[in-house]
Amino acid sequence: MRAWLLTLVSLVGLAMLAGVGAQAAPPVDRVTAVRIGGEGQATRVVVESDAPLKHHVFVLAAGSSRVVVDLPRVRWSINGLTAEAGSGKGVGVVSGYRYAHNTESTSRLVLDLAKPAVVAREFMLSPKTSGERHKLVFDLEPATAEAFAAAAADPAPGPATVPQQAARNPLIVIDPGHGGKDPGAISKSGLLEKDVTLAAAFALREELLKSKRYDVALTRSTDLFIELEDRVTKARSLGADLFIALHADAGPKPSTSGASVYTLSQEGEKRIDGARRANDWILDVEVDSGRPAEVNRILADLVQRETKNQSARFAQMLAESIAQTGWPTLENAHRQKGFYVLLSPDVPAALLEMGFMTNDNDAAAMVSETKRRKLVNGVVGAIDQFFENQTRLVAAR
């Protein structure tokens, strides 16, 4: 869920997110799995995440017996399903588990116990390969009622004492268009759009990282073909704050020149609704079982509408910023179309047509490191303005 949605959701009395600018409690880490298995007398609980988790574990005996794991605010994405809350079955001394957001800045995992047990060991395992996750491991061992009561008697800290994750930079996902078997448009001199967009993506990433204000990810960093849906899914799974697709246009007239910026059209929005109905791109607010389904639906519609507004705001900034650098732009440079990569219902997105491959001057400028710097500076300027604007809005609340 994008952090800028706090103001939106607060309007209906559900302050569930923090503003990007304020960055009070960004959902920095993503928990991807909770695995429970038996090992002799012990029951092992493994919490998998994208990054090492700060945590505090304690035992509660009031009401039902349970082990509680408090975390900084995380994004729950268990078994591929992103949700505000959920539950699962247990094994051994664990009868089941539950997870949710405990406060605006913390999340909580609860292990319901089938019999008294204590935490015998807890440790972290770092990934050994790039495809592995970080693992937080707990070994629970059966205990006498007296030993369990003694463990539960130790004072447990309130949510405010959970270690807080450091505020993160906004994550910009750059999508170099085409790739692999799909070359895109081809210039008269033989330049391929897929190569032009990748080179521009590298240049833009370098400038953004140089500022130290942003984290940056590319949907592809080699000459690789990626399905359109996978580009969108990657941005959402990474928790992107902004998605920028880079392309180069082609036209019937060689004289046509200039950049343009696209956001999603009304026809394209209907495709989002279809994906949501099919649960392909489910939103965090749609799966909160603690709220009526109608409220979840209203919130999801509000999220989608605000995403559209944020996209339009950024696109206008982008078109103006590029023009101010002296890079040529088309008349009425901000346009709308149903491009698939703009379909994400919860990530502000824009598609930048950097120029025309069919225009000799545009094609030459897009591959010239010196001339392209104008374009890159224009994009970085718009990104700075977009996030600075959000900071002001949050500060004014």
Image (cartoon, rainbow, N blue to C red):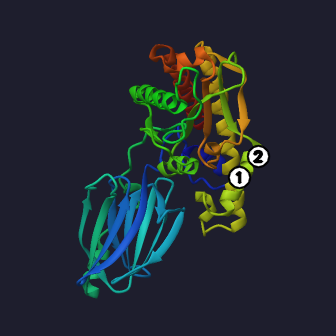
Look at label 1 and name its amino acid: Arg
Q: Is residue 114 visible?
A: yes
Determine whether 215 is above or below 32 in the image: above
Q: Quadrant of residue 48?
A: bottom left
Which residue position holds label 1?
271
Where residue 266 sits: x, y (%)?
A: 77, 44
Identify which residue is drawn at 45% across, 41% down: 220
Where residue 239 sits: x, y (%)?
A: 50, 48
Which residue position holds label 2?
267
- Discs 1, 2 touching: Cβ within 8 Å: yes
Where residue 241 sits: x, y (%)?
A: 53, 41
Identify which residue is drawn at 66% across, 42% down: 339
Q: In which quarter of the image is residue 361?
A: top right
Asked whether, in this view, residue 68 is left or right of residue 363, the answer is left
Asked whether, in this view, residue 198 is left or right of residue 143, the answer is right
Residue 91 vs residue 234, the one in the foreground: 234
How far is the residue under mark 1 from the one under mark 2?
A: 7 Å
